[in-house]
Amino acid sequence: MFERIVKNLIPIVIVVGAISFSGALFYLNQGETGENTSDSQKIAQTAINYINENMLQEGTTASLVSVVEENGVYKFRLKIADQEYDSYVTKDGELLFTDGIKIIEASQTENQEEASSTEVPKRDIPDVKLFIMSYCPYGLQAEKMFLPVYDLLKDKTEMGIYFVNYIMHDKKEIDENLREYCIQKEQEEKYSNYLNCFVLDGDFEKCLSETNIDKTGLASCISETDEEYNITSQYNDKSTWMNESFPKFDIHTDLNEKYGVQGSPTVVINDKVVNISPRSPEKFKEIICQSFNSQPEECSTTLSSDASSAGFGGGSGSSSEGGCAE
């Protein structure tokens, strides 16, 4: 729901501090402009400052066009490049609404999505695909959800991690996507150990050493894959970028198009896009187990019911709705 509300607003990486009933609210950082004020222009500019500092890609800037009072909040118009958008902020400057929606319609849609999220086709051997960007905080969250289930069910399912076909986190994301793709392709038995290490602190060099990855073979695979899919060459040619903002990463473009993948994370089970909420290993396991024609005994194993934390690090988190999408 949240990704659909914001995806046509601005090209952002969504980092959610707190979410209210519709998932379209963000807490603003306090103290940047001093004490709260009723001055609509100052409050709207506070929201613009927050957007620039926390929600836009480097080199992209929003500016304030106008602000008016509407339905008890301030409606402000912002401009990014040549596009203008409407957003809303409460009069005390504490909540930013990225869009305005009708509560009844949103509730009905969320109920429909929740119903569909658990209705997955059944197979003897389920096929489970997780599409991510390697540096997306919510892609990392989904990987931490994925890994315990992979370790439990990898011999009973076809499970793998795939990549969204564009990049939002600079060249380092291209490098890590290629690294993970090649480890999974050619050293699969070491892949989950590598990923379990990487999601904790992002130190790929340490993780390669700790998991005894064949670095020579890895470098060869990366070079060949890069050349096959023109990844670096497209990165260097900005005329090929999506919306002139996002470098392409074409390794799994055919699957992105087949399933309508729009952002990170996207889960596909037996060719159906599935919403996992909360993003906990136990919830993920339950939905996968529902996709078996006959559930294996591993499905009786109980995993953690806590939503994994977003971004690097261990522990649990509070949000299961965020994502990275253009």
Image (cartoon, helix red, strand yellow):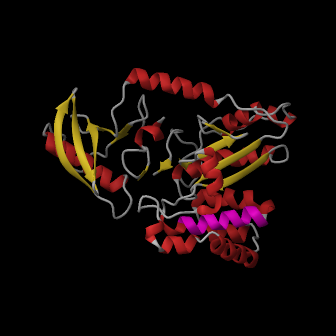
Query: In the rendered view, would you say 61 is above or below 277?
Result: below
The main secondary structure of the magenta stretch is: helix
Left or right side of 142 for 120: right
**The image quarter in which residue 116 lies:** top right
Query: In the rendered view, would you say 108 is above or below 203?
Result: above
Q: What residue do we see at 64% from left, 47% from top? A: 258
Pick the front one: 146 or 78: 78
Q: Residue 83 location, x and y as percent?
A: 29, 51
**The image quarter in which residue 275 lies:** top right
Q: What residue do we see at 67% from left, 73% from top? A: 222
* Residue span colored magenta: 173-186
Q: Is residue 96 magenta?
A: no
Q: Is residue 56 visible?
A: yes
Left or right side of 80 for 215: right
Q: Residue 317 location, x and y as percent?
A: 54, 42
- Tell me how many marks there are: 0
Q: Residue 268 location, x and y as percent?
A: 66, 42
Q: What residue do we see at 57% from left, 54% from top? A: 313
Query: In the rendered view, would you say 123 is above or below 13?
Result: above
